[in-house]
Image (spheres, rainbow, N blue to C red):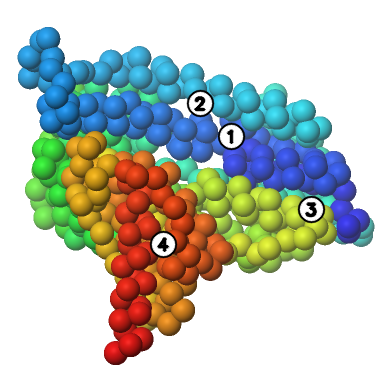
Amino acid sequence: MVDVTRIVIIGGGPGGYEAALVAAQLGAEVTVVDRDGLGGSAVLTDCVPSKTLIATAEVMTGFDSSYQELGITLACAAERAISVDLGKVNRRVKRLAIAQSHDITQSVTRSGVTILRGTGRLGPGGQAVDGSREVLVEESDGTVRSLRADAVLIATGAHPRELPDARPDGERILTWTQVYDLDELPRELIVVGSGVTGAEFAGAYQALGSKVTLVSSRDRVLPGEDPDAAEVLEDVFRRRGMNVMSRARAEAVKRVGDRVEVTLGDGTVISGTHCLMAVGSIPNTADMGLEEAGVKLNDWGQVQVDRVSRTSAPGVYAAGDCTGVFMLASVAAMQGRIAMYHALGDAVQPLNLKTVSSNVFTDPEIATVGYTAADVSCGKMDAVEVKLPLRGNPRAKMQGIRDGFVKLFCRPGTGIVVGGVVVAPRASELIHSISLAVDNNLTVEQVASAFTVYPSVSGSTAEAARQLHIRKRAESES
């Protein structure tokens, strides 16, 4: 172990609190400086709240789309069988978020970590003679406290990006952090932005009963995801009645009484009762004394880090959305852990983004891991693929699932699995077997030979592996 004993972590999100737990377990004296509550935006305003809202939407979508086929009859033949009380849903969302934050706080406190409520920044003095750094903490009562640290972790996250001509008012023009204050379901919701956040909320509110228009500046929704997966989701959106506007860039949003008007780049004006802005995020790195301390930021204000979370300034690490490496809570947590392993001299394995599994919580979900179709098409990875539609899967037929597929990528010579995509209900659970294969360099033969339950949706993963094995064998014999 190296002689690093004092750790100060600025930010209490997944990158911060997971790092604190590791550092405390390794015997360090740890202080977390947090402004809003442990868990950060992931727990308080982003992942936990949005997925809780989506959980309600999933129940409604599943029932609406399959109850007749499954033989379920209703006593009251209303136009729509079920409806939602959004105020009640949002109160549950907030309650669960606060409870999760409380649980995290208790866990961190029990580990011996000191939590300071306030805003932290690096001190102006740089490194002291003993190699430590100063962290200035402005506490909630205005008191400024000075801390010395052998290592500092910046884990301050990010906040929603705002357009100059589309300022949120928290009532009709909203960011994704503000939607949980709504008491009534938006009748006509315009979602600006078709990335992961925009697609998730558009799908959720469509399921809850809103009339949704999704404004996408790109050719398709989810431009960063697998093209086949995005095509399935866009088709599902349109089939369920969503108005998906492609190649339509929002230039301005304004409130007109109890309605909003969104002006597009071609001059078209669309109107709704509410507008949700999902146009990216801004790292929380301003006014923290980072550049003065020698911490390099990129053009977007994100902290530049290496694979063990080091910044350009000695003794300063960074993790999570403020780095822009891969904006997932799981990656933030891993970056934070890696930073502490490295700072405290423990065994450390550098971050490997090609083993990260991610999920888009739409209906159907889109889960991915490893190399992608884009990597294959551009020559970054030499791989062959098999895609199996779920409509041929017996369990999917029983459950009334028509949309989705399993896709596997493997090396043509060795058959090692290098990536995969699952588009299905609960794809976030189904991707794990492919993640294990990618992380452990398993071959398609090994995946195909493992038992799966019959009938199960996961059986399609084994079948895809079998088909890749057959293709690989045929190519080797030709």
**How far apart, in angstroms, are the residues tagged by discs 4 and 3?**
47 Å
For mark 4, give the secondary structure: helix
Up the image or down, 219 lies above or below 107; here it is: below
Q: Badge 4 local density, few (<14 within 10 Å), some, or many (20+)? A: some
Instruction: Say if residue 8 shows up in the picture.
Output: yes
What kind of residue is marked 3?
Ala
Q: Mark 4 points at which residue?
A: 448
**How far apart, in angstroms, are the residues tagged by discs 3 and 2?**
30 Å
Q: Residue 97 carries which label?
A: 2
The residue depicted at 29 percent of the width and 27 percent of the height is: 59
Looking at the image, tell me whether mark 4 or mark 2 is earlier in sequence order.
2
Q: Badge 3 local density, few (<14 within 10 Å), some, or many (20+)? A: many
Q: Name the residue under label 3.
A: 151
**How far apart, in angstroms, are the residues tagged by discs 3 and 1?**
21 Å
| Front of the two marks 4 and 3 | 4
What kind of residue is marked 4?
Ala
